[in-house]
Amino acid sequence: MQNKYYLIYQELANQIDKGKQKPGDLLPSEHELVDMYDTSRETIRKALNLLSEHGYIQKVQGKGSIVLDRNKFDFPISGLVSFRELAEKMGQDATTHVHQCRVTKPDSFLQKQLKLSRNEDVWEVIRAREIAGERIILDKDYFDRRYVPFLTEEICRQSIYAYLENELNLTISFARKEMVVIDASTEDQKWLDLNGYKLVVVVKNYVYLDDATLFQYTESHHRPDKFRFVDFARRNR
Amino acid sequence: MQNKYYLIYQELANQIDKGKQKPGDLLPSEHELVDMYDTSRETIRKALNLLSEHGYIQKVQGKGSIVLDRNKFDFPISGLVSFRELAEKMGQDATTHVHQCRVTKPDSFLQKQLKLSRNEDVWEVIRAREIAGERIILDKDYFDRRYVPFLTEEICRQSIYAYLENELNLTISFARKEMVVIDASTEDQKWLDLNGYKLVVVVKNYVYLDDATLFQYTESHHRPDKFRFVDFARRNR
DNA sequence: CAGTGGTCTAGACCACGCT
DNA sequence: GCGTGGTCTAGACCACTGA
């Protein structure tokens, strides 16, 4: 069972996906939706806000809710989407090579990133992602050991996140991403098929739990030609 | 004059910025804030949602609103921020070189990007951005002429956006961004100080008006070492 | 258990667009 | 002027946290 406003959101989103409402059309007005769903206007408005955040509609005061052409966005819309996430969604054959999975002490860079002292333990996991026969992404993950006491190579080969959420009951609540381009390191050269590229696109990821503590720092090194990011940004206010 | 919830948001954000509420602290409960601001709870909740979206707090059910350490984020937080936007905010001396500012017909690529027919007019504006003495960003903007009838080099040297919003009363409502890395073109080599770099990071920008029509397509070509993007993403639901 | 945030209601008035 | 979405109110009940 779900929230009322979430159910209404899903139903309207579904209608738009199926083409019952076409791009450029106006949705029924909020008052009409109140009658249709036998609910209050604030609940309808929450559903419409979800539609808006997910790129289904654009609200215009005094006019109505315009249905957007979501097909133009050949991509999932909300937030950022990386090449790997996309490949996984598309069901492309992705293989993971685990090069490192050990407990270690943080170096000074990591101490700063994870706000740790020199003596605390961190898990270091290094994995290469092979998609369509090429190793194009190198992921370096660091977990605060106080939150992640135990890991195995097997878990690293599968999804660490599934393990954290299902086994350890950790809930990720938000993340900060940063993207830069730097020279490929010797690790990158060793574990990736760089095809002569000398640069890699690095996506740094700071992941927070729902009590707002930082517990993971990740760097994803992408081969430049296989890097792609998409974002969908509503204007402030 | 502003919305009530926006004023409350600003006041609370201000207190956090000034350190009256320290990271890890809990804000007053929603009921207490209702009394303090003599308003309704939904209004308080709208203010708190804004704080949450802007990275000031993290809400935890049954517990309260935790103040986050926003200083860790040495960057503006909401949405994506490019190097140029940052440089401008920091007040660094940015110079704009206008290389092109003319009306032309869209080529097939542009027809596809802007959903135009071959016969419609577009403004083509090409500008190099010089920051701290180096030309590091090449912006190529294309505007649907039906929305932007008139432009001058002078306007291009200043802010086109200020002109669109203040003079033409166009309101930008949302944008889709896409980032890829490609080989530097001859234009890039001619108009940028590439320092030997053979690649550029391209940020493609599709900008929509508040009636959901697409009116601008922009490509920003960044020198790799001067490219930096930041994002702050709340987890879905 | 008391206190917190999450959802929901049934109103009200305002700001805007259209014609 | 009428219909639209935007803001705001004063309640209510539920779900979760922590002592």
Image: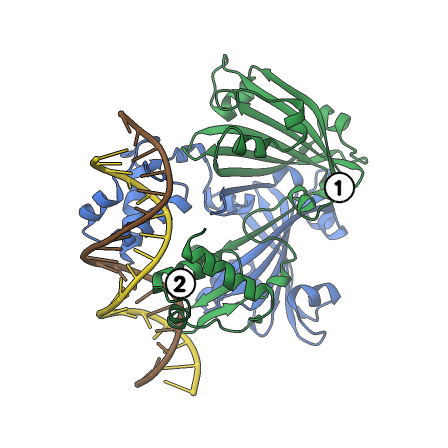
Chain colours: A blue, B green, C brown, D yellow
Q: Up-down: is A193 above or below B73? A: above
In the rendered structure, the answer to whether residue B7 lies left or right of residue A36 reads: right
User: Circle 1: is it few (<14), some (14-19), or many (20+) Cα within 10 Å?
Assistant: few
Q: Are marks 1 and 2 in contact (CB under 8 Å)?
A: no
Q: Residue at x 44, y 66 (%)?
A: A166
- Residue that mark 1 sits on: B93
Which is nearer the eye, B200 or D10? D10
Q: Residue at x 73, y 63 (%)?
A: A109
What's the chain of the residue with tag 2? B
* Residue A160, x across and y down, in percent: 53, 61
Q: Amino acid at mark 2?
A: Ile
Q: Residue at x 64, y 62 (%)?
A: B72
* Residue B59, x across and y down, in percent: 45, 66
Total marks placed: 2
- For the N terminus of chain A, the quadrant is bottom left
* Residue B187, x across and y down, in percent: 72, 24
Q: Amino acid at mark 1?
A: Asp
**Alpha carbons under labels 1 and 2: distance apart:** 41 Å
Splitting the image into 4 quarters, where does residue B141 fall? top right
Which numbered circle lies on residue B44?
2
Which is nearer the eye, A31 or B78? A31
- Secondary structure beneath dot 1 equals loop
Q: Up-down: is B231 above or below A170? A: above
* Residue B113, x across and y down, in percent: 51, 26
What's the chain of the residue with tag 1? B
Splitting the image into 4 quarters, where does residue B161 fall? top right
In the rendered structure, the answer to whether residue A194 lies left or right of residue B119 reads: right
- Secondary structure beneath dot 2 equals helix
